[in-house]
Image: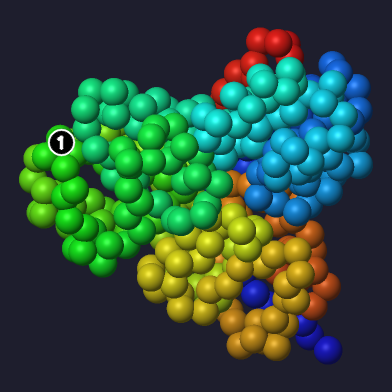
Amino acid sequence: MKQKEIKILLAAPRGFCAGVDRAIEIVKKSIDKFGAPVYVRHEIIHNKHVVESLKKIGAIFIEELSEVKDKSRPIIFSAHGVPKSVPKEAKNLNMEYIDATCPLVSKVHREAENLNKNGSHVLLIGHKNHPEVIGTMGQIPLDGIDLIESVEDAKKYKKKFSKKMAYVTQTTLSVNDTKEIITELKNKFPEIQEPKKEDICYATTNRQAAVKKISEKCDMFFVIGSRNSSNSVRLVEVAKKSGCTNSILIHSESNIPFDKLNNCQTIGISSGASAPEILVENFINNLKEKFKITIEEVEIIKEEVTFKIPGKLS
């Protein structure tokens, strides 16, 4: 029986960004330097495959420092960043800590801190309870920052103080949705100060642009990534809004919808910034078992960004 033919449009760039590469490298180099185990506060990045592979070489993942059984072992802070109270707690416990916060997240932390010092009330555009948002809000006193999650929040927001106002954003948001929120805030508070440089990171922007370019040509769109990965979930939303309503997230417990694929001629594939390329390859190999596959990679920009690891590990 002749196999059905399906064309894959493979979005590029996709997968790991420089901040994720750096965070994983920090865990590996910490184990090389200090031996196993090393503790990691929160998942180093939001990907089960990566977390499991690091557990195998000696990483122990915890949520709070109180869970660390042996305080003589080093602790690594995840790529999402942490509130100021966490390094302070580590110091009080005499724990060696290594900060794997993405430098682009650290940039937002410093922005929020400087704005607060200069007398501005800060609005953070982001998703409640996301580790990055918790980390950014924890850089300044709680009465100095408010969270805005949606255009609706922006419309309802009432200025609490006679202070100047400024906004910063989570780095992994939908570019378009964030623009709408910012427009609303600027209309309502024309004097609001904006970041000197865009807070949404280059990798988020590039991956969303690549998905946008190909999604309207696709009958189905697949984003490889974890359910708790903000940037992966945003890619699914972008694909849907850009013309492929049949877009889904493929995570560690997903089943491939082969029945739906029987009705497809062209499908799109991308992956979140915390998803290793091996997961994309495995997904395509699974498709090859059922269909005759041709692949066209559609690259919108070459990424050459790298971040240095902390000096104490080099």
Q: Identify whether 226 is placed above or below 218.
A: above
Quickly name the residue at label 1: 163
* Quadrant where the image shows the C terminus: top right
Q: Nearer the viewer, residue 162 or 7?
A: 162
Left or right of residue 106, residue 9 in this image: right
Q: Identify whether 237 is placed above or below 219.
A: above
Q: Quadrant of residue 264?
A: bottom right
Q: Nearer the viewer, residue 281 or 204?
A: 204
Left or right of residue 266, residue 182 in this image: left
Q: Which residue shows up at 70% across the image and 81% down it?
A: 257
Question: Where does residue 122 sit, x and y in percent of width and height?
Answer: 28, 39
Q: Which residue shows up at 57% across the image and 40% down it?
A: 80
Q: Which residue shows up at 67% across the image and 67% down it?
A: 250
Q: Nearer the viewer, residue 243 or 33?
A: 33
Secondary structure of residue under mark 1 = loop
Q: Identify whether 304 is placed above or below 204.
A: above
Left or right of residue 285, residue 161 in this image: left
Q: Identify whether 113 is placed above or below 135.
A: above
* Quadrant where the image shows the N terminus: bottom right
Left or right of residue 280, residue 286 in this image: right
Q: Quadrant of residue 280?
A: bottom right
Question: Where does residue 167 sit, x and y in percent of width and height?
Answer: 27, 41
Q: Quadrant of residue 228?
A: bottom right
Assess disc 1: are there few (<14), some (14-19) or many (≥20) residues with their C-alpha within 10 Å of its C-alpha. few
Q: Amino acid at mark 1?
A: Lys
Question: Where does residue 313 sit, x and y in percent of width and height?
Answer: 73, 14
Q: Can residue 10 be seen in the rendering of this structure?
A: no
Task: Report the coloring of the rendering.
Answer: rainbow
Q: Which residue shows up at 84% across the image and 16% down it?
A: 33
Question: Where does residue 85 sit, x and y in percent of width and height?
Answer: 55, 31
